[in-house]
Image (cartoon, rainbow, N blue to C red):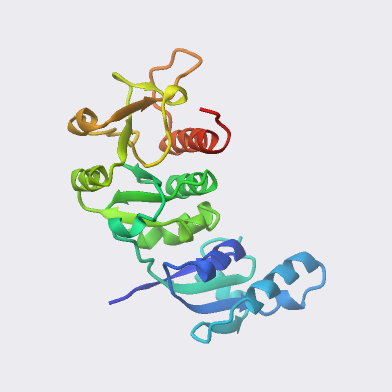
Amino acid sequence: MTTSIIIEGKISVDAVLRSKYRKVLTIFYDVAKLQRKRNKKRVKALKQTLESINSKEVKIEAVNQEWFEKNAIGKTHGGIAAIVIERTYQKIPELLTSKPCIFFFLAGIEDPYNLGYTIRSLYAAGIDGIVMKQRSWHDVEGIIIKSSAGTSELMPMALVEDLETTINFFKSKNYTIACTGKDESQSIYQSNLKPPLFIVIGGEKRGINRNFLDKADLRLTIPYEREFVGSLPINSVAVIIGFEILRQRNYSNN
């Protein structure tokens, strides 16, 4: 049985309307907000979203403030929300395109806000897709969409049962397999991070399985300026590596 969720806010609603991975059932808007004159920019933005809905399958309902007080999680909805079905995720082969790509495997990420921030950063850096272990994000999808500024609806993503099987698939497609780790690793600034590349980032609690570390083609580390024995949060690691990849893709002469 297909389940539905409520997402809220203009950025989130605009994202699900653009998404190839989710069906929008109903859009709700606060009719009183369209009649207010003190914030013309916000009213105009709300009208633009409603006017962009050209699918006959999407219902549009005018509701009052009480509807949002009852159904919205917070107060930053801006007078617009949507009922959508669960996101569909890609099969691993569906992620591949005709050009060499770069994918991130995010291991051990638990917090939906951190996941949203990480997706937003990798999307901005031009990463081609994200792979994660199989689990249900149903109860927190609205948080992920909002914290990712809608990019979670646009980023190709796959959920897998087994990392080793996934690694073997990418190896068979001549992808370099890289992972983050401190032992026998080299700086990201001295590494070739050009595609085709599959990068595994370990979670802060459990890290990456030693058996996988031994099988990786490339071990990466982020150099610190000061002596520091701790680990960076996974979203910080993703930002740093993602934008080093962007630099090498577009701004490096090497």
Relative side of 32 to 146, left or right: right
Relative side of 54 to 118, left or right: right
Q: Pick the residue in front: 52 or 72.
A: 52
| Vertical order, 235 against 135 (above or below) | above
Residue at 61% across / 60% down in the picture?
76
| Vertical order, 171 against 253 (above or below) | below
Indicate the position of residue 212 as horizontal and vertical percent values.
Answer: 21, 34
Indicate the position of residue 251 as horizontal and vertical percent values.
Answer: 58, 34
Relative side of 1 to 83, left or right: left
Q: Which residue lies furthest to the top in this view?
A: 227
Residue at 51% across / 38% down in the picture?
249
Residue at 19% across / 47% down in the picture?
165
Q: Which residue lies furthest to the bottom in this view?
A: 56
Indicate the position of residue 148 as horizontal and vertical percent values.
Answer: 51, 52
Quadrant hosting residue 138 = bottom left
Q: Residue furthest right?
A: 38
Q: Pick the residue in front: 53 or 142.
A: 53
Q: Is residue 135 visible?
A: no
Relative side of 87 to 59, left or right: left
Q: In which quarter of the image is the N terminus?
A: bottom left
Residue at 34% across / 62% down in the picture?
89
Indicate the position of residue 252 as horizontal and vertical percent values.
Answer: 55, 30
